[in-house]
Amino acid sequence: MRWRVALVLLLLALPRPARGAPPTATSASPDHPRYHVPVAFARYAYFGDAEVPADCAACGDLHLDGHALRVGLQGGHRLTGPRLILTGAIDYDLAVVTASGAGRQDEAALHALQARVGAIKQLAGGWGLLVFVRMGVASDFTDAAWTDLRASTGAGVVHFWGPDLRLTVGFTYSNNFIGELVLPLVHLQLNRGPLRLTLMIPRGAALWVELGPRFEVGLEAQAVALRFGLHRRDRFTDEYSQLNVTAGPAARLTLLRGTFVTAQGGYNVRYYRLKSGQEETHSLLTFAGGFAALTLGYMY
């Protein structure tokens, strides 16, 4: 039943492009790089059962089963005078986690709402500077606490080799997973004829091949980390962190004027951490097996 509800939400979230909107990517020029990013999208994914061993004293013989729905909106605007590219995005994540075992079952709906703003200052010689800030909140929304606040920020140096090749190198700080982390930031974007390669460390990578004007296939790997606060006393834990690393083939069909549908499947590696108060009760790395995902969106 839950997957039917999620599918309905996906269909409702499908954006309607404005009249007269461009059908595909922006025109390419050295000062106007071509980007292939979804302007609006909704993505549903199912992750199978993961067993937490009995040495988790706080939760007993626990099995975790998860669904995830992500709805996002992003865009940008180029200011010609100051040679500045402004970007913005807002994402909503819904993770439905079912915990069962030891004669009990608990289903928690966990929410994360985050907004991001960024800027790329174009300098001479194809160089540029990137800065961004992302803020939000993640919990079961039954109560509120300052520990539910999530923040990410980063900066980097950008170099453009024409309209179809861009490299960004820098750093990023985030408290979205486990605790406060400072990680390297690498973003490579390459377009060569029908091939499109994107490398985003620490978020993932993708290689796409256009087989026709409306159809392309590819390989994608993604890492999505979220940390939620749980406030009800009868929950299976006080803080739930998850990292899903997925990899597998994907196919994308463009339907009309940039509207697309993407189907993906493959292998999933998951890491969970359960925390009660200030004490970590258990952490688990599991090679969970398969996953499946469906994305609907609009690409500019």
Image (spheres, helix red, strand yellow):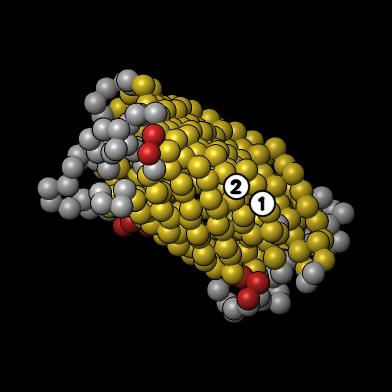
Q: Quadrant of residue 237?
A: bottom right
Dot 1 falls on a residue whose secondary structure is strand
Dot 2 falls on a residue whose secondary structure is strand
Question: In percent of the image, x 66 and y 76: which residue is there?
Answer: 232
**Which residue position holds label 1?**
182
Judging depth in this view, the residue of 45 and 138 nearest the camera is: 138
Residue 50 in the image: x percent, y percent?
Answer: 69, 47
Q: Residue furthest front?
A: 124
Q: Residue furthest left?
A: 20
Quick check: can you spot residue 265? Answer: no
Mark sitting on residue 230: none
Compared with 76, 268 (above or below) is above
Question: In percent of the image, x 35 and y 54: which residue is there?
Answer: 86
Quick check: can you spot residue 26? Answer: yes
Q: CA distance from mark 1 to mark 2?
A: 7 Å
Judging depth in this view, the residue of 113 and 14 nearest the camera is: 113
Question: In percent of the image, x 82 and y 61: which residue is there?
Answer: 281
- Tally the marks: 2
Question: In percent of the image, x 22 and y 35: which residue is there?
Answer: 27
Compared with 100, 157 (above or below) is above
Query: What crowding class fits label 2: few (fewer than 14 Cα within 10 Å), some (14-19), or many (20 or more)?
Result: some
Of pointers 1 and 2, the one earlier in the residue sequence: 2
Judging depth in this view, the residue of 102 and 140 nearest the camera is: 140
Residue 164 in the image: x percent, y percent?
Answer: 35, 29
Residue 234 in the image: x percent, y percent?
Answer: 71, 74
Identify residue type, mark 1: Val
**Which residue position holds label 2?**
171
Identify residue type, mark 2: Phe
Q: Are marks 1 and 2 in contact (CB under 8 Å)?
A: yes
Please identify the quadrant where the C terminus is shown: top left
Q: Is residue 39 left or right of residue 22?
A: right
Query: What crowding class fits label 1: few (fewer than 14 Cα within 10 Å), some (14-19), or many (20 or more)?
Result: few
